[in-house]
Amino acid sequence: MKKYLLLLLLTVFSFNLSFAQNISEKEIRRLELIEKEAMLKGDTTALYKIWHPKYVVNNPYGVVVTIPQISYLIKTGKIDYSSFDREIEKITFIDNVCIVMGKETTTPQNATENAGNIVVRRYTHTWMKNKNVWSLVARQASIFN
């Protein structure tokens, strides 16, 4: 009888963990979409809502930048896309941290480096949950093609 009770408790516990992770994964996927759409539109207001105040990026050109630098690049047209697609390949949760890895395909435009060319990048995002709110704390992207 004890074996059955233990098995039942383990099953319920596993289900609860899986259910909670599914909710968190859906939230991260939603935030990833918001971030992608905001980057495509150059919408810094939307980006500020999901970026952590200490957000840092190792950009595809090997330069580490922070929010003021990223904002300047967006406002001056140095980050500007006519298309931006993102394919999430892996989402991993470790306590209050979430790591997202995948591939992006962009078409930079205007004053952006590689304007008019299709650029494929590998990327990693690090999200952190604080007081039930996920914030993007770090990004790394490398040009793949």
Image (cartoon, rainbow, N blue to C red):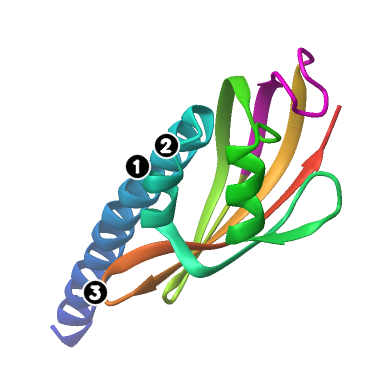
The kind of residue tagged 3 is: Leu
Q: Pointer 1: residues within 10 angstroms few (<14), some, or many (20+)?
A: few
Query: In this image, 71 relative to 24: left or right?
Result: right
Q: CA distance from mark 1 to mark 2?
A: 5 Å
Residue at the location (34% across, 42% down)? 30
Q: Residue furthest top?
A: 116
The kind of residue tagged 2 is: Leu
Question: What are the residue bounds of the magenta stretch?
Answer: 102-117
**Cβ atoms at labels 3 and 1 below 8 Å apart:** no
Whether residue 38 is situated above or below residue 124 in the rendered picture = above
Q: Based on the displayed image, in which of its 4 quarters is residue 29 positioned?
A: top left
* Disc assigned to residue 30: 1
Residue 113 x %, y %: 82, 29
Which residue occupies the foreground of this view, 11 or 55?
55
Query: In this image, 128 relative to 89: left or right?
Result: left
The kind of residue tagged 1 is: Arg
Q: Based on the displayed image, in which of its 4 quarters is residue 82 positioned?
A: top right
* Disc assigned to residue 33: 2
Q: CA distance from mark 3 to mark 1?
A: 34 Å
Q: Pointer 2: residues within 10 angstroms few (<14), some, or many (20+)?
A: some
